[in-house]
Image: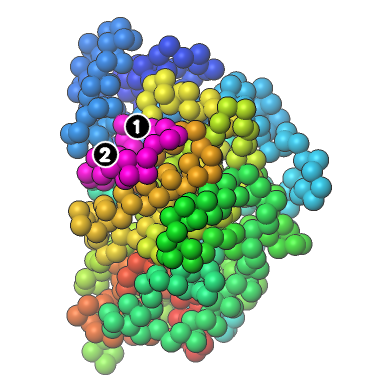
Amino acid sequence: MRRPFNRIQALILRKMAEALFHGQPMAISSRQVVDNLQDLFGNITGNKPREIGLTVLLLGLLLGGPFFIWGSVDTRVRRMRNRLERSKNDLMQDFARLRGIIYAGYYGHWQGNTQEDNVDNPVFQAIGYTLPAHRNRSMAGEQKLEIRTGHDLTHEAFVGHDALPDEEEVIVIGSGAGGGTAAAELAKQGYRVLIVEAGPHYPTSRITHEEKRMAARLFVDGAIQTTRDRDIVVFQGRCVGGSTVINNGICLRVKEEGRSHPLADDVLATWHALGAPINEARLDASYQAVEKALKVSPAAPLSGRNNGPHLMKGWAAYAEATGLERDRIAPADWFRKNWGDPGNACVYCGYCNTGCAYGRKNAMPQSRLREAVGHDARILADAQVTRIRWKADLVNDKRVADGVELLLADGRRHFVRARRGVVVAAGALASSRLLKSSGVANSGKGMSLNIACPVVALMPQGTRVDAWNEDQMTSYVDQGDFLLESHFQPPMSMATLVPGWFGDHFGRMHNYNRLASAGILFPADRCGQMKGGKLSFKLRDDVELPLLRRALATLSKVHFAAGAEEVYPALARGQALGAGTHWGDIDQFFEDNIREADDVTLSSSHPQGGNAIGKNRDNSVIGMDFRVHGTTNVMVTDASVFPSCIRVNAQLTTMAMAHYATADASPF
């Protein structure tokens, strides 16, 4: 196993772990925590392990160097409290995020390879967690934990690196929501399609419940990719199927009667005002086509039997207490998802975010990519497109793509000519980087995020929520300008979401069975741009930060309305709210404790924009035909084409827009 941290870095991490767990009965040693981190980061490709290693060294120096390493544990705790937990300095707040990495090394402990090897996993036993294979499934209607591989891609779908083509008719860059959909539609029209994916292929048989290994292998940067200033973690898949492999399969339209708040901003009207009119009837048809192809259906109540109803119960009580019309008409419902097909129903193991180990999710590899391959498309995995190469001669004063330059996993380079055209669908960040490196002007500007922030609740003594024994996300409330979403995570991921330091965090995690959890999702519209290959993103003091405070206050009140004893919003310092707190005091609590993004844990799984569609080249990169302005044969079909933030989960709309762009007429 590659060990990315040297002896000094490993020593600093071990000393930090000893301090964070000081006085607590650790189930594994601090040395084992570091070994787990070596394993986690040893499986991450790219520069992230080196970046984290340098951060560890610098933090060790800032905490006192040899005085921190060789001083007493009490001294280390005191230094970490003063310089990390309580600091308001931006740099030290960034360093404080290493706390989550160490907790991942502890709660992500895994023995051997299988669930059977972890029957006696000491960390799981200490917090009362049971792996799916060992749970009681005796309730009527329970789904059996059978592994089904019949929908997986076979080896015939892939092009080997020793048999690379020199040309193909159409090259689709990216295999996620946008790329997989475009590839399927183009292949059905008779185009010979090559799908290029930067990440590896992980079929059902290779997916396990070892969180740290799956996160390292399936996510960009091992699920710790951040914005330039480290204020926001950006989750993105890096595998065949992209983020559809590691998401919760949520399928919401930008607006839908009965499922969207009636007073929410009309996204399509906003796009029209920005010069990007979308034909709503055509988009509706695309939604329907995608939903049919993915067998989208409501999450079964049994799959969200604990945490899902908690949110809806709390919301009903909260809305009754406020008496506000806006709250009364807010939809509160079960999510619709791209699994739940009666013939292959979800087994609600709770590990959606690290891949479906049971072959139930209709992610791109189990749906649209299979469809594309059935029409003779082929997939080239572990190959990154570094640049689109242009022909020397223009056609009608427009550039023509000749093909793409590839960088293979072993370092070799290769050029593949595109006889008809190129489709860019690598995700908002990667597509913006690629277009910018290919000389496309204005790419990577006006980027948006749907930003998530968790709020965990402790239910009363004697209550056993067991929110981990179900699907991760099942219910939601649309409040108009933000959403509330139920969610719960397996131990490693949950440990990074639960706020608190030292004994507080330890105690909260050891009440694992009494925790309920939900999160807010709010739009940050066109606040970012790509700089030096990374996303620079700043929340505005007069727009996003007040919305963040109000949404967190609302969710805290909802938890209390559902009977919570304590509420733990994701504040960097880990402050808690107690039952009986006056609602006005809750509002003031967030006003006092959130002054900037660094004060709270924020993440996004929905990067959007950067290459907006529009009729006017002055404020858009892509035309209404989804071709890059000034080109004849380069299309973009991922969420980077969104002119503004869509406010809800972006998966379904990304697929629908890709279908809209490619299905109705031969685009090349």
Using the numbered discs, state the Cα–Cα distance from disc 1 to disc 2 in whole angstroms: 9 Å
Q: Quadrant of residue 38?
A: top left
Instruction: Check the picture and name the quadrant holding the C terminus.
Output: bottom left
Counting labels gives 2
Residue 440 visible in this rendered orientation of the protein: yes
Along the viewing direction, whichever of 440 and 617 lies nearer the viewer: 617
* Kind of residue at disc 2: Asn
Badge 2 crowding class, 10 Å Cα cut-off, few under 14, some 14 to 19, many 20 or more, is some
The residue identified by callout 2 is 593
* Residue at x 60%, y 50% (from the top left corner): 309
Q: Is residue 8 left or right of residue 322?
A: left
Residue 193 visible in this rendered orientation of the protein: no
Above or below: residue 581 compared with residue 431: above
- Residue 594 in the magenta stretch? The answer is yes
Give, as a single range, the part of the protein colored magenta: 571-597
Q: Quadrant of residue 117?
A: top right
Along the viewing direction, whichever of 32 and 276 lies nearer the viewer: 276
* Residue at x 71%, y 30% (from the top left corner): 116
- Residue 61: image location, x then y, percent: 20, 21
The residue identified by callout 1 is 575
- Residue 228 in the magenta stretch? The answer is no
Q: Quadrant of residue 397?
A: bottom left
